[in-house]
Image: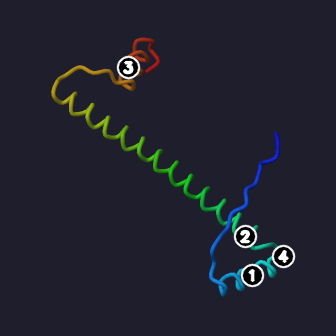
Amino acid sequence: MPPKSTKNITLAIDEDLLDKARVLSAMRRTSVNEMVREFLEREVKRETTEASRAEVWGRIFEAADSNADRRELRKAGELIFDREEFYEEVMRERGLL
């Protein structure tokens, strides 16, 4: 796989903050540039992870709502397909339950 290309950006940072960042980066034996890059990578990863979690929870809640709707239809006497009931019926027919 070819190496990722990098782009230069310009940041406007308070001089005092930049001085402190330089001291911190020296203590960590890295550069301010690397610290900013790592910070951005962590933030993007965190945001992506949170978005993934939100998507998963959305599907869980959607499934729960769907099951609730299914139970309401069953109470109303309407016939609907239920995978679990179908599975149990097939297993009973085969003498496995």
Q: Where residue 35 is drawn, which disc sits there? A: 2
Mark 3 vs mark 2: give the one in front: 2
Which of these two is toward me, 32 or 80?
A: 32
Q: CA distance from mark 4 to mark 1?
A: 9 Å
Give the image location of residue 52, x and y in percent. 52, 48
Disc 1 on helix, strand or loop? helix
Depicted 44 relative to depicted 86: above or below: below
Q: CA distance from mark 3 to mark 2?
A: 57 Å
Q: Earlier in the sequence, mark 4 or mark 1?
A: 1
Q: Where residue 29 is drawn, which disc sits there? A: 4
Q: Quadrant of residue 26?
A: bottom right
Q: CA distance from mark 1 to mark 3?
A: 63 Å
Q: Earlier in the sequence, mark 2 or mark 1?
A: 1
- The colour style of the image is rainbow
Q: Amino acid at mark 1?
A: Leu
- Kindly check if marks 1 and 3 are in contact, taking CB atoms under 8 A apart as contact: no
Give the image location of residue 30, x and y in percent. 81, 73
How crowded pointer 3 is (Cα within 10 Å; few <14, some 14-19, many 20+) is rated as few
Which residue, given by chain and number where applicable, does mark 1 sit on? 24
Q: Residue at x 34, y 40 (%)?
A: 64
Q: Where residue 74 is drawn, which disc sits there? A: none
Which of these two is toward me, 12 or 32?
A: 12
Q: Amino acid at mark 3?
A: Phe
Q: Where residue 86 is drawn, which disc sits there? A: 3
Q: CA distance from mark 2 to mark 1?
A: 9 Å
Give the image location of residue 50, x and y in percent. 52, 55
Q: Earlier in the sequence, mark 1 or mark 3?
A: 1
Quarter of the picture containing the C terminus is top left
Q: Residue at x 27, y 37 (%)?
A: 68
How crowded pointer 2 is (Cα within 10 Å; few <14, some 14-19, many 20+) is rated as some
Q: Earlier in the sequence, mark 3 or mark 4?
A: 4
